[in-house]
Structure formats: structure tokens, C-alpha cells
Amino acid sequence: MWKRDEAVRPASGQPTAAPQPPAPTQAGAPSPRPEASRQMEKDIVNIGKSVVIKGELNGSEDLTIEGHVEGTIQLRDHVLTIGPNGRIKAQVFAKSVIVLGEVTGNVTASDKVDIRDNGSVDGDIVAPRVAIAEGAHFRGSVDMQRKGGAAQATKPATSQTTAQQSQPPAPQRVGA
Amino acid sequence: MPDDRRDLEFGIRDSQTNPVAGPESQSPIPAVGLLDRLAPRKNEPDVRPQGPSSAEGADPVFNTKALRKFLSCLTSRESPVLLDLGPVVGSNVSFFGEQLGCKIFVEDIFADLDRHVRDGKLETLPPFMKKRFPQPDGTFDGILCWDLIDYLDRPSAQELARELTRVLRPDGALLGFFGTAPPQDTRYTKFIIVDEMNLKHRYYPATRGRQTILLNRDIIRLFAGLHVSDSFLLQNNLREILFRKPA
């Protein structure tokens, strides 16, 4: 009797053998994610807060600057991010420039310049798209050069379409 | 939709007869003194938001009459160059840059004024204004002066007006706003373009308030090198004046 009961009771709770197989698969699942993020982190080069660079900075990968750079920065086909601690006194050429810190100097981008909240730019911007957040500081000029020349500026339909694509609450084109 | 968007048809249009101070008596509307009135009419609600609570709510939107005309002056030029004397507004930059193909210069004179007030160096503001714009004569096709003049003392306003007249190209346009009622508190206004007929007013703290309520003749004397193309008095006690530089 006792032996029979003991034989039954342990099985009445939960089958002990069943949970074991999934355990190794669950443990194995998360491992690819950190690798991917690590790989992404490797692709974005970071210049830390304490780094000071004076001179010409060229690169062919995305770059985030948290330190100080004086001179020239060229990332022709890549994204340059000036972090909140970044202080730049330089001429900047990049595909896209995101500013969260301070930039003194002219900024030229083939795609977009994005000055975020608390970002600051003192200089002239040349880019087809420019976004300036509320709370950002900017002093200088903005030239949104457009492919196809200035003639497009006088064509209402074309310019309106362009603006609506890039900025949802776009106001209406004013006819001449 | 706020009810302050009703139009007020006090606009007087005449580019040659100095309409602001000029022949109001010719108008069928008894317009004498209307443009110079210092307080809203009793039968009109003062639509200007009062007190700090306005900053907490949604930004009020006001009608504008002169902006459309200013824009049409700009778009008559290819690749116009615009000078904005107010703080940078991202959506305005996009509007002028992407839609009108303007090159925009942002020169926040309000920030300059604040700095001089904070540093206690207001006496240096007039000479500062005199050297503020390094651009050569006739650089800009349009100037957005907003309501800046109201916040300046007379000598600074004179120097600034002289400089703006210089850097404006012949046939260029300058848009100025001028208050007609003493303000309730100390604040600046960011004018955010909603569309060609509407401006959103976003208030932010100022180091000092409006210095004076200018009469029309004072404004005209201030911008002696320009002539008044259009003038409108809006329901929010704001005068919109569009100046043109003689060609």
C-alpha cells in the first residue's frame, strides 16, 4: 500500500521530466539578440566625452561625437550625430547630421540636418531637408538647395508635393 | 477652433498715399483714429490671452492679412532670400525653405535684446544694431520683423530700421507687427505660420516688455526709406504693416 501511494503521489504534482527539454531552448533563444546589438554598436563609432580632436576627421561609417572636435568633419555617405555632450567647432560635411549638442560652423548635408531639442547650431546650413525642434537654438542661414535647381521653387504643384512628403502639417503653397 | 479668428476689415490698401496716417476721411468707414486706438472696443472681446495661463494651454491662432501679401512678394522672385528677426521656428524654416525655395537667415534680435538687458548694457544696443548686419546693401528680398520694434527703445529701433532698410533690396518687402494696446505681462511671441491666413502665437518669457505703443506716424518715420503697401488692424489689437522698398 505505502509503496503504491508513494509511487502515485510524486507524479500527481507536475511531471518532472516534461519541463526539462524546453529549458535549453529558452536559454539559447536570447543569445542572438545581444550579438546583433553588439554588432550594431560596433558599426557606430563613438568619440567619448573626454576626447578632443583638432584637425581633419574623415570616415566611412556612422559616427557619434560626445567629445570636442575642432577643424573639419567629413562623413560624406554616413550619419554624424553630435551627442548632448558634443562640442563641435568645425565645418561639417555628411549625409545626415543630427545635433543634440553644440555646433559652431557651417553644416552641409546631402540628405538632412536635424537639430533636436537643446541642440544648438551657429552657422550656415545647406541641406535639402532641415528639421529644427522646439527648444533648439539656431543662428545662421538655411539653404534647402533642391535637385533640379531653383526653377522648382516657382512650380507650386511640385514644391507642394515635396513639402507634404517631408512635413505632415505642411501649410499651403502660396501662389504668386 | 477659437473664436478669435474672425476677420477685422480695417485694412486700408494704398501703396502710394501713405494709408496708415493718410486719408482716412476718404473711407466710408469712420476710420479716423481707429488705427491708433489704444484699447479694444467695448463691444469686442479682447481675444489676446491674458496671464500666464495662456502658456499652459494650446497656442492661440490668429488671423493674418498681411502675410499672404508678403508671401506673394517673395514668390515673385526666384530663390528669394529671407531675413527672419525672430527666434528660429522649425516649421517656418520648412515652410519658407521647402515650399517657397527661400534661403533663410535667422537672426534672433530678441535674444540680442535679452542679452543686453541681462548684462545691463542697454546703452550699447543702438551701436550694436548699427553693426548687427554685415550683409551688403539690398541682400534680402523679404524681412520678417514681427513685433520686434515694440520691444526696442527709440534709438535702437531707429538704428535697426535704418539697417533693415539698407539690407532690403529695392522692391523688397518688410512685414512688421505693432501693438496697439499696453501688454498685460512681459513676454515675447513666436509667430508660427499655420498657413498663409493664420499665425499661431506662442508666448515665451521676456526680460522686459514692450517699450512703447507707436503711433502710425512714428512707424512711418521710423521706416522712412520704405513706403507702406498694406496696413491692417486685427481684432487682437495687432497692426500688420507691409512695407515695400521703392524700386
Image: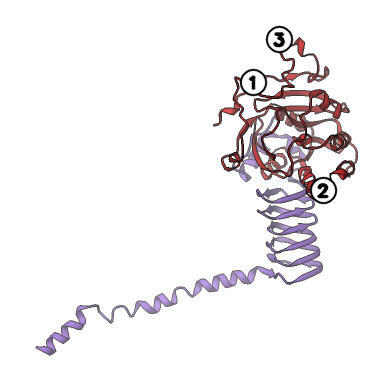
Chain colours: A purple, B red
- Chain ID, mark 3: B
* Residue B65 location, quadrant: top right
Residue B132 appears in view:
no
Q: Quadrant of the N terminus of chain A?
A: bottom left
The mark nearer the N terminus, 1 or 3, is 3
Q: Residue at x 55, y 71 (%)?
A: A36
Q: Where's residue B196, x and y in %?
A: 67, 31
Specify whether A12 is left or right of B229: left
- Looking at the rendered structure, the kind of residue marked 3 is Pro
Q: Are marks 3 and 2 in contact (CB under 8 Å)?
A: no
Q: CA distance from mark 3 to mark 2?
A: 49 Å
| Numbered badge on residue B28 | 3
Where is A24 relative to B39, above or below?
below
Q: Residue furthest left?
A: A1
Nearer mark to the viewer, of 2 and 1: 2
Tell me the residue that label 1 is attached to.
B41
Q: Where's residue B19, x and y in %?
A: 79, 18
Q: CA distance from mark 2 to mark 1?
A: 38 Å
Q: Nearer the viewer, residue B157 or A112?
A: B157
- Looking at the rendered structure, the kind of residue marked 2 is Gly
| Numbered badge on residue B120 | 2
Q: What is the secondary structure assignment of the residue under circle 2?
A: loop
- Chain ID, mark 1: B
* Residue B2 location, quadrant: top right
Residue A118 appears in view:
yes
Mark 3 is surrounded, within 10 Å at the Cα level, by few (under 14), some (14 to 19) or many (20 or more) other residues, namely few
Where is B221 relative to A125, above or below?
above
Q: Residue at x 63, y 72 (%)?
A: A42
Mark 1 is surrounded, within 10 Å at the Cα level, by few (under 14), some (14 to 19) or many (20 or more) other residues, namely few
Q: Are marks 2 and 1 in contact (CB under 8 Å)?
A: no
The mark nearer the N terminus, 2 or 1, is 1
Q: What is the secondary structure assignment of the residue under circle 3?
A: loop
